[in-house]
Image (spheres, rainbow, N blue to C red):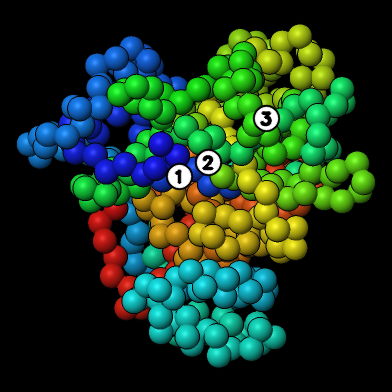
């Protein structure tokens, strides 16, 4: 079965949950950028899940037992509540918003506002853009499930790796395309209650088993033989590309290959930074991307074992080289310093968001309109965002150390109907 989406009854869903673990939507370009708890005993559960048991329907009374927990809410606010509103240069956000409209205009609530936006010149003055938002949108403050109004803002970027389309002594670490035996189980096909819940696995005979973990793949590369896209020269760079979700690979002839997220093995992300700190390899304050890379250079004999503590594994696809940015979950190119990854169970994908936070490792205000164009497997909860810094080393320097507190307001068309979060 080649990446077929299966519609399951609740009995099948319960069985599959035990097998591969539910994940909130497909992890995107920013697939797995912070720690989530690891799953347990999945393989043992698989033996009890023959395919013929996926057919009979089960009483819907079982649904509340695995219903999705509340993640946050949106509360109507006023423009004067937004710190620094109107001070930021909104032009870069306007270009990003028009990209969002390409995906949003299929939704009834967005048709009118996106049509109006298309009539505004891209070179319109800042005051015109600010006024457009004030006239056509209402701000809703994002509130966490516990009632608090602030949360964590991290960063990500598009790295540059060095590689080759053919393996060599130097280029020996592959990036893989999505394998043919990886299946995705979409729970919402039969039961809308499970919207945003998808699971991944593989069929072995008549059983759904967890897909191979990172350690499985590192131990036996034959499971993905023939799916190599490109080979690069640094295993740690490959690992961090999995975390960022997209990047570019410079080839020996000087050309550049762009790669982006294609799929993920269904295993939950486990933070290697947290493991390194728990085991005394790094101290608090040393667990940035830069800190982990420095530790890896000093401890080459330990690298593979620690990286394998994270069972999650990302698969890639080659993207057109002329894109303006990597493709996010919304399906449009991301804009440096104007796109963020969010939890779509609280914040609708594609919407403008007013973010108030600070620049990395400083108290300098970073208040601006951004677009919720991406998601991430570890971006969970209401006030939780991953800020896209762009491409290259300078963007990586900012992204690698960004761990700020912030607040968020979602900007929605005035006729938009808020549903329960």
| Nearest to N terminus: mark 2 or mark 3 | 3
Q: Is residue 215 above or below residue 260?
A: above
Please rate how many residues cluster around mark 3, counting C-alpha atoms within 10 Å: few if below 14, some from 14 to 19, many from 20.
Answer: some
The x and y percentages for residue 296 are: 76, 19
Checking the image for residue 263, the label placed there is: 2
Q: Is residue 214 above or below residue 256?
A: above
Question: What SS does tag 3 mark?
Answer: helix
Checking the image for residue 288, the label placed there is: none
Q: Is residue 177 above or below residue 101?
A: above
The x and y percentages for residue 222 are: 62, 20
Question: What SS does tag 2 mark?
Answer: strand
Image quarter in which the N terminus is found: top left
| Nearest to N terminus: mark 1 or mark 3 | 1
Residue position for label 3: 239
Q: Which residue is painted at 58% across and 88% down in the image?
A: 120
The x and y percentages for residue 91 are: 66, 76
Checking the image for residue 26, the label placed there is: 1
Whole-angstrom CA distance, mark 1 to mark 3, is 19 Å
Q: Which residue is painted at 29% across and 14% down in the image?
A: 47
């Amino acid at each position: 079965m080649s990446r077929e989406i299966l519609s399951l009854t609740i009995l099948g869903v319960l069985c599959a949950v035990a097998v591969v673990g539910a994940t909130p939507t497909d992890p995107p370009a920013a697939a797995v950028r912070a720690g989530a708890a690891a799953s347990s005993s999945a393989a043992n559960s698989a033996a009890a899940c023959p395919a013929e048991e996926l057919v009979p329907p089960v009483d819907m009374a079982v649904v509340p037992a695995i219903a999705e927990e509340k993640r946050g809410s949106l509360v109507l606010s006023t423009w004067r509540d937004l710190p620094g509103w109107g001070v930021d240069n909104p032009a870069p956000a306007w270009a990003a918003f028009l990209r969002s409209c390409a995906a949003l205009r299929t939704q009834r609530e967005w048709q009118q506002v996106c049509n109006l936006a298309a009539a505004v010149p891209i070179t319109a003055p800042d005051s015109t853009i600010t006024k457009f938002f004030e006239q056509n949108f209402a701000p809703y403050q994002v509130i966490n499930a516990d009632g608090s109004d602030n949360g964590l803002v991290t960063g990500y970027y598009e790295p540059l790796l060095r590689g080759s389309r053919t393996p060599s002594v130097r280029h020996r670490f592959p990036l893989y395309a999505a394998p043919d035996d990886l299946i995705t189980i979409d729970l919402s096909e039969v039961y809308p209650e499970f919207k945003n819940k998808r699971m991944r696995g593989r069929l072995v005979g008549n059983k759904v088993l967890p897909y191979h973990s990172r350690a499985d793949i590192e131990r036996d590369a034959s499971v993905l033989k023939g799916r190599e896209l490109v080979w690069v020269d640094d295993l740690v760079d490959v690992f961090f590309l999995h975390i960022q979700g997209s990047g570019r690979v410079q080839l020996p002839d000087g050309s550049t290959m762009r790669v982006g997220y294609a799929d993920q093995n269904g295993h939950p992300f486990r933070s290697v930074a947290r493991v390194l700190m728990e085991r005394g390899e790094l101290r608090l304050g040393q667990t940035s991307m830069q800190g982990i890379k420095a530790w890896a250079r000093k401890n080459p004999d330990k690298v593979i074992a620690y990286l394998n503590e994270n069972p999650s594994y990302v698969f890639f696809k080659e993207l057109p080289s002329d894109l303006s940015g990597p493709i996010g979950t919304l399906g449009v190119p991301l804009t440096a310093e104007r796109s963020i990854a969010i939890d779509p169970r609280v914040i609708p994908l594609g919407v403008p968001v007013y973010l108030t936070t600070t620049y990395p490792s400083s108290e300098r205000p970073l208040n601006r309109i951004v677009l919720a164009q991406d998601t991430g497997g570890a971006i969970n909860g209401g006030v939780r965002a991953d800020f896209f810094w762009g491409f290259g080393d300078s963007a990586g320097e900012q992204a690698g150390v960004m761990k700020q507190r912030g607040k968020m307001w979602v900007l929605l068309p005035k006729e938009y109907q808020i549903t329960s979060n």
